[in-house]
Amino acid sequence: MTPTHRAFGQMSGQNAVRDFVDADGELALLRALIEATSRDPAVEPLAAAAARMIIDTTGADVCFVHVLDDGDRSLTLAGATPPFDREVGQVRLPLGGGISGWVASHREPVVITEDKESDPRYLPITALTSPGFTSMASVPMETDPGGLVGELSVYTFARRQFTPRDVELLRVIGRLIAGALHQARLHRQLVARQRAHENFVEQVIEAQETERRHLAGDIHDGISQRLITLAYRLDAAARAMHDDVDEASEQLGAARELVGLTLEEARAAISGLRPPVLDDLGLAGGLASLARSIPQLDLEVQLADSRLAEHVELALYRIAQECLQNVVKHARASVARLSFVVHDDTAILEIVDDGIGFNATEHASGDPQTRGYGLLSMTERAELVGGRLAIRSRPGSGTAVTASVPLQPPILGALID
């Protein structure tokens, strides 16, 4: 028999145990909670208000409200009564960890009358530990549209045997605020996504402007200057035609050389906008050409001859280009592997090197200053076409960069000729 079952078994024979609140107090509490849920759409204010109301009405000493994180893998303390309110947002529990995590993952209440430390599910949390706590009751917070939302628990310093009516009241409270918390989570996610979208649009515009400035600079400093010099050469050749044939021939030869160099720079500028190799050979051919242009690496290549939508091919090509440049500049690698496959309607580009690696956890924080423009640019390119970028690395163990892009059936085209 688990501690939960023992606790409920003890309660059934304790008719003298006092319930949390009488009917009038219960009704007043539920009314106050309903009002609070309609007043503030944010998670933390709502959780804090609920915790205070529960303590004020029930006579318990402390209340904790844990809310499921957006990834549905852990619980975060979203509301607490003093003195633990200062820990809100700081305490996190893995789903299933500790009594609160067990209640949330199993979606069953737990009541412990005393000696909670002896419960096998107990997990000490320094920030929330008080030697005076004796009894506790914990219930899951669930809502029909959102499923599990979190966990609610109350503690008392004096020994207390919580009645089934107490537990049912806590479950009703949990269900009541769970709906509002679920909506608050959705609102928070929507705001975060909107901000991320706005930031992304700003970054894309900034990147476009940067590329345009670079292209304008290349045209001004390279192509324009060469065309001016070409004009001088042709003028000199024209003047020398009647007086010095050898001089005219030399000027024309130099002009011809300038024409060749100017064409090369013009092609490079065009390639900066969209590599012509993608139009001619597709992504596989473009990646093969890119690999041949990097003699510094012993590069193993494995490429599928699958044609994708133009914007997907361009995004994956640019990711490979940026990633290989990073390998050459920073990884100190001697061997690398470039692969492109299409599996289960997903295009997968992967680049693995044997370089010095780095701490991928620190570089995944989302801060452009710590991730570097290269990693941020690759991530954004993948997200722009509906994909994601995964980076696996640690110091001394090389780096693996994987871009995965889900494909709709019409995107897959004919094989490369």
Image: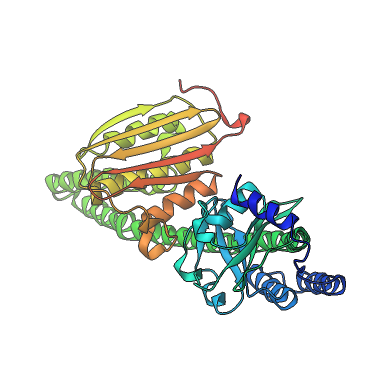
* Residue at x 49%, y 46% (from the top left corner): 382
Q: Residue at image x 53%, y 62%?
A: 115
- Give the quadrant of residue 411: top right
Q: Which picture quadrant has residue 171?
A: bottom right
What x and y, as percent, mark residue 401? 37, 43
Q: Quadrant of the N terminus?
A: top right
Q: Quadrant of residue 191?
A: bottom right
Compare residues 123 and 245 and report the one nearer the observer: 123
**Position of residue 345 in the picture relative to residue 181 (left or right):** left
What is the x, y in percent for residue 170?
A: 73, 62
Compared with 21, 68 (above or below) is above
**Can I make out residue 69 in this image?**
no
Depth order, front residue of 389/411? 389
Above or below: residue 352 compared with residue 72:
above
- In this rendering, the answer to whether 323 lies above or below 177 is above
Instruction: State which quarter of the image contains the C terminus.
Output: top left
Which residue appears farthest toward the top when viewing the image? 417
Front-most of residues 4 and 177: 4
Camera sees residue 292: yes
Q: Position of residue 131 (x, y in %)?
A: 49, 72
